[in-house]
Image: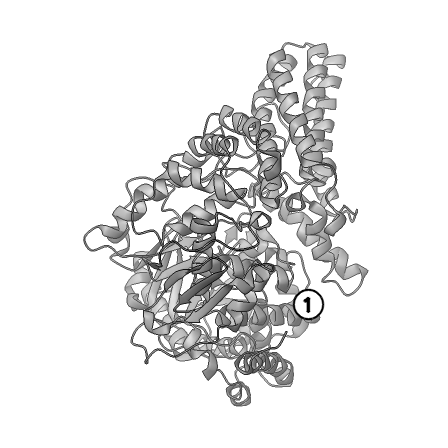
Amino acid sequence: MTISPPRRRRHAQLRHRVALAALVAVLGAGSPALADVADTADVTDTADVTGVRGPAPAPRAFDTGPAREALQRLLPHHAGQFTLVPDPAAGADRFTVSGSAGAITVRGSTGATLLTGVGWYLQHVAGADIGWPGDSIGMLPARLPAVPAPVTRSALVPHRYALNDTDDGYSGAYRTFEQHQHQIDLLALHGINEVFVQAGAEYPYYRALQGFGYSAAELREWIPGPGHQSWWLLQNLSGFGGPVSERLMRERAELGGRIAEQLRGLGMTPVLPGYFGTVPPGFAARNTGARTVAQGDWAGFDRPDWLDPTSPVFGKLAAAYYAEQRAVFGDSGMYRMSPLHEGGTVGTVDVKAAATAVQKALHAAHPGATWAVLGWQDSPKAELLAGVDTSKMLILDGLSDRYNRLDRETRWGGVPYAMGTIYNFGGHTTIGANTSVWIERFGPWRAKAGSALKGIAYLPEATGTNPAAFDLFTDLAWEAGTIDQRRWFADFAGRRYGRPDKEASAAWEELRAGPYSTSSGLWSESQDSLFTARPGLSAVGAAYWSPKSMRYPADAVRRALDHLLKVDPKLRGSSAYRFDLVDTARQALANHSRVLLPKIKAAYEAKDLTRLRALTAEWADGERKLDAVTGSDPNFLLGDWLAAARSWGADEAEQDRYEYDARSILSVWGRRSTSEGGFLHDYANREWSGLIGELYAPRWAAYFETLEESLVRRAAPREIDWHAFEEDWARRTTRHPSGANGPSGDPYTLAKDIAAALKSWEGGAR
């Protein structure tokens, strides 16, 4: 593929920045030489695409090449039927779609907005879906349909932010550039314009801190493995899952730089981590005048120290950090920082003054940049907001759909905020979201007098689940009228599989009325599965911090599965149908675990060994079916997760280390104190093939064996050290199916078998 001159220049700049990072290895962090070298990188070409808002120069034409390349990736057989026209004078975030059959024209204000226009056309005219995951583009006609009349849409809010701080850890810290690129394509297709970039975020710390008294070896021990770095950046932990190699950090930094460049090429804002004071142990002793505050405990981990931002050393370290970051990642107009996230210790630090110093350091490196802070628990505190220019701040509200009686203007004093949703925690494979709450709140919150709502924030802790939720939430920012939830789901069912089908519509109506209409008040996520829970007769959930009971009638998913199995055979060939069928069968079976476990408990308490054995056999059969059906779709394979981690290791020892990083976050999460005292074991539980068969099923089998022994011997069940059991699994290096040949079995046959089994078990009513 021919790369246009502007695109070649951006590629060259990226290579230049990465090369600079290697060349300055001999320079001290924060030295004048470093600044001189960094200044040789031409960043002026990216200044118009960083997403900085406010007074702007006259609109300039932009290169549609990156959007065209994305379109070719998304619609390889139909991209040629689209003409993409840059229209920067149209105003921010605006597109127009028009055209005759086979000749569709999309005009847009940025490359990403052009793709949003394509997404609108697919959704509203062509009736096709490119979801996250699954698509129905194979059902598109060879010649795309005409647009009945030109349609223009403008974004209702300037900020359409995506990705939780935890997304890299829970969605896959070892992903390839191509996987990140596809994610960016999907985000642009759905109207997102600001994306958090975490990959490689450790590298600026590693480089900068070597100029403040730390050796490279010390820092490699302090920096955690990639799977746990999300929480290190949040100042919650350090060291776990490492040590990391310098080669790994360099390669991850290059990956992060490419991701940022990909976003800039589409006119999107790469949101980069900012610096607010995280330092390794002993910083004050090595740097005269520095004041640090021990941050105490987070879920069983010792938190990294906090360098008082008002101390003179902070400004020097922040400047060194931003210089190192710029050398590889370039500049941006938005930076993510959440001081005192989930606790922390203020000590003698003046939080207001500290906030002023943090923003001052940010603006010294990036004048006018927006500070994005997560709205979570009691953060951001009033003292922090009082110390900053709030016109340059955006609060990403992670609780917008979780609780009731929320008044964000009063709570945050009119600081601009984005209405957010966290409908997935830890990467749980659970269907559902408070979609009705989104619809009920977004319009009124935006229209209220003095509203400070300026955006949406797509913040599931892991992406790649719940494609309907992703579609609907991002639609909020582009649909001027109130969305009719029932109609929206009916339309979604039609485009999801390529054309309307009464059984598909019936299935999605069941899902809409059930798991996608859960209420606010306490939770924003649906319950997880007991098959994935640590064994116990009184288990009510797998993750300690998740709902303890059903949040919707289980029959809704069961009926949805029956309807999906009756969808027209001609519509069953798409990856969208396959994913939805597997996911719905998985959820129906997961819900059955909450019916079955109380029966097992009753049989044990009645000392009915025969019934206990029959019921635990049913449980084991359910787990086998669950492992098989998830093994038929590539989105549910443990093997891909593990193979990705190993691919970043240079030798077997390093591969094993990164595999442990990847396995541990799914199971023990951290060390014993974290797993047990911090209640983080199984926080990231998920029903994946391989994970079910190798960890969850054997764990329950071992437990049920103790119950049988107890009844036979008439003694209390022997205790099992579950952390040791799970740690043993996390230390394994067993291989599992992965890649193109990973999925096995026919999804339809396996899902049909689950439906029949559920009917049989329900009919038996044991």
Front residue of this view, candidates 595 and 761:
761
Q: Nearer the viewer, residue 205 or 580?
A: 580
Q: Is residue 310 above or below residue 634?
A: below
**Residue indicated by mark 1:** 248
Q: Could you tell me which residue is drawn at 60 percent across and 41 percent down?
A: 579
Among the 4 quarters of the image, the one containing residue 631: top right
Q: Is residue 449 left or right of residue 662?
A: left
The answer to whether any part of residue 224 appears in the image is no
Label 1 is placed on what type of residue? Leu
| Residue at x 52%, y 90% (from the top left corner) | 36
The quadrant holding residue 349 is: bottom left
Which image quadrant: the N terminus? bottom right
Up/down of 46 relative to 245, above or below:
below
Residue 87 placed where, x, y %? 38, 72
Callout 1 crowding tier (Cα within 10 Å): few <14, some 14–19, many ≥20: some
Please, what secondary structure does the residue beneath circle 1 have? helix
Across and down, in percent, residue 352 comes to 32, 65
Q: Is residue 258 above or below residue 232?
A: below
Q: Closer to the camera, 216 or 132?
A: 132
Residue 203 place in picture, x, y as percent: 59, 71
493 over 146 or under it: above or below: above
Q: How many marks?
A: 1
Colour scheme of the rendered structure = one colour
Left or right for 520, reference 604: left
Residue sticking out furthest to the left? 449
Residue at point 23%, 51% (across, down): 447
Q: Is residue 28 visible?
A: yes
In the image, 402: left or right of 727? left
Q: Quadrant of the C terminus?
A: top right
Place of residue 198 in the rendered image (x, y in percent of width and height, measured from the top left): 54, 63
